[in-house]
Image: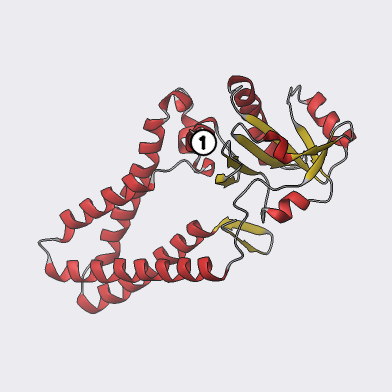
Amino acid sequence: MQVITLGPLSMNASLLFALLALMLMFFVAGYLGKKQQQNIESTLWWITLGAVLVGRLSFVARFWTDYRGDWVAIINLRDGGFMWQAALVFAVVLMMALVWRRPPLRHGVFCSVGAAAVTFGLLWGGFSLWAPSPAQQMPKIQLVDLENKAVSLVEYEGKPVVLNLWASWCPPCRREMPVLEAAQQSHPDLHFVFANQAETAQIVQQYLDTESLKLENVLLDKNTQLAELIQSRGLPTTLFIDAQGRIQSYRMGELSQATLNAYLSTLK
């Protein structure tokens, strides 16, 4: 999976590379700003802030029915809901509007943004070249259900599959579980599979009973073999697999109702 682990922390590779590219962009902007006596950093801050807001608000607008009435969820960027296409278009348009008629400022902004773009491209290209290739198909392994009956994951092919790796001790796993439970009930055309990581059937059943969760397809990955096969670096991890068993997308981290619906759209 496209994830980088730094000690106890795991982060989506593209997000990490984007942050590193932004850091370099502002470093170059600071250097050129002092040299050219132009306030390049301030211009780039406004462009970046505007792009982030537009990207987030565009996602919220697309899935407004899931956010309506929940203002905390709107500002909760941890759910990963973001439309980078809208953010990129806005950033380019605003950048051109601010600097086109100011040649000295334009030169500094273009150089800073260019440095960031080249850095992101090199980091992503190197990572794609050298990182182990993630699984592209539904892992062909057997897990066991809560009654210790062997279940092969390929049995779920024929319908799209949402495969969630979780544990009862994991706070974001616990927070997203009601969202997944509701989705399982409202999407009979999908298989939702919950692969618990390295916990006993007794612990899992106790958790489900305590939280009053009614879940189907709860399986035990006793030795975390599934996590190793898909190169999961943190919990929760959710795979979105089409009816032919091909992995279409994944999410490492908590799912909100809106982000879950966004990922489900990749299966249609």
* Residue drawn at (73%, 40%) of the image: 153
Is residue 128 visible to us here? yes
- Location of residue 144 by image quarter: top right
How far across and how far down the image is residue 122, in percent?
43, 71
The correct choice, above or below, for 78 with respect to 23 in the image is above
How far across and how far down the image is residue 7, in percent?
68, 64
Q: How is the image coloured?
A: secondary structure
Q: Quadrant of the N terminus?
A: bottom right
Of residues 106 and 179, the one nearer the viewer is: 179
Seen as rendered, the residue at the extreme bottom is 35
User: According to the image, label 1 marks what residue?
Assistant: 267
Say which element carries label 1: helix
* Residue drawn at (61%, 22%) of the image: 188
Residue type (three-letter) at the residue carrying disc 1: Leu
Of residues 152 and 91, the one nearer the viewer is: 152
The correct choice, above or below, for 261 with respect to 107 in the image is above
Of residues 112 and 86, the one nearer the viewer is: 86
How far across and how far down the image is residue 131, in percent?
58, 67
